Image (tube, helix red, strand yellow):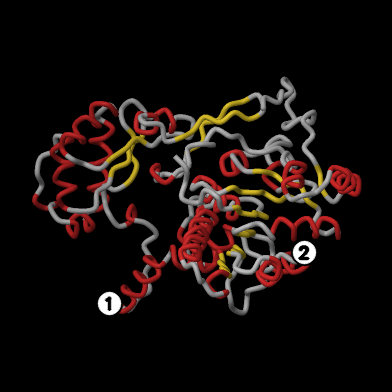
Amino acid sequence: MNGVLSGKTVLELGSMIAAPFATHILQQLGARVIKIEPPGGETTRKLVRGGPSGTYIAYNRGKDSMCLNLQSEAGARVFRDLVATADIVLHNLSPSAARKMKVTFDDCEAVRPGIVFCHIKGYGPGPQSEDIASNPIAEAATGVMYSNRSTGKPSRLGPSYHDQFAGCYAVIGVLSALLDPVAPPERRNIELGLYETGLHVAARELVGIQLKSQITGKAEQEPSPEFSMPGYGAYETSDDRWIYLVMLTDDHWRKFCIAAGLGFDPDLATLRQRRKNRPAVEQIVTRAVRDASYDSLAASLAVAGVGFTEVLSGDRVLDAEQARNPPKFTTVPFASFRFDAPDFPVSAAVNATNLQDPPPLLGEHTAALLRQSGYPEEEIAELLALGAVREADDGSDLWNMKSEQPVMAR
């Protein structure tokens, strides 16, 4: 089944996560994505032992790669030729780099009137619009990092959720522009900041702080439900596995007590009572879980209707029955390896025709794209000789492996 964006061409000038994640979704929805990279390739190609990282493999599969030196006159001309036949341009270059390489909305609109353009940047309009920001900076500036103190000091969450949220918002913006056949320039010129993304994602917490300030007169912040709901969180079973319990309501507590074989205690029947007796409640839950094996407790919790799951390490996640039946991922070959890469979760919207296509080598499609743009072989050879463009070198190693040199299997 073809995706809703089949027939659309996206030019991506992306690095790291936000822009490549956005175009990954557009590709899964059927668009053709041409990934335009500088001669050294984008950052995630060289993050793991000198080769591609999980980020590159997961979010760049199925794209075409054009290796292009935009700082050369010939490379800039090739880019303009690509823009002339594209539907969407999406990038996360810094504002100054975008102007220097003439990759702004005005530059692209002049070549292709009506184009949909999206720039994911550190900050949207405002006094910091020229500043550089990354995922952890967005976390720090929007309140997320302040409450995440696993080591006692504010620290980043780990996964780059703000980058990925920004990628999702970018897709929403692109689709909204495509839905309007007479979209004005201001709708087609999508400027999206990681900072503004972080504000929107943190809206619940920011409004909650305001609520408490107006009710109690104090700006109190509860970093997560675990800190306010006794019995909510991860607990260890007798066989040294971890189970995560969701204990939001009095009914959740009642069902847990039934599943764990605990007697009803009227002094702990309400959340207010349990909060007042937090240490006692935590001790009750910890002991009840520690006295049972994971499988036996899970069976009882499922019958009682308690929300729970096992806390899984990353190497076990895709072995779960829910992940495998039906498969929520596609097995993708790359170099001498195979990777199970999760797909866009709205399966009915996914273009299934090219799901197994691997991520491209740097410049793998350069010559083919130039031919499609009408460049004769002599001019392609000249561009390659000038260094304005680059083709993939199938003989180069992808990773610096001591024991094994990966063999290309493409």
Q: Which mark is residue 259?
A: none
Element under disc 2: loop
Judge the density around disc 2: few (<14), some (14-19), many (≥20) Cα neighbours within 10 Å.
some
Is label 2 or label 1 in front? 2
**Looking at the image, which residue sits at the far top?**
403
Question: What residue type is disc 2 on?
Answer: Met
Judge the density around disc 1: few (<14), some (14-19), many (≥20) Cα neighbours within 10 Å.
few
Q: Nearer the viewer, residue 264 or 134?
A: 134
Q: Quadrant of residue 189?
A: bottom right
Residue occupied by mark 2? 101
Residue occupied by mark 1? 215
> What x and y, as percent, mark residue 232?
29, 48
- Residue at the image point whose x is 25% and y is 36% from the top: 287
Q: Is residue 201 above or below residue 408?
A: below
**19 horizontally vs 272: left or right:** right
| Residue 154 visible in the snapshot | no
Marks 2 and 1 sit apart, C-alpha to C-alpha, by: 52 Å
Q: Quadrant of residue 321?
A: top left
**92 horizontally vs 396: left or right:** left
* Between discs 2 and 1, the one toward the N terminus: 2
- Residue at the image point whose x is 14% and y is 34% from the top: 261
Q: Is residue 320 above or below residue 201?
A: above
> What x and y, as percent, mark residue 49?
71, 34
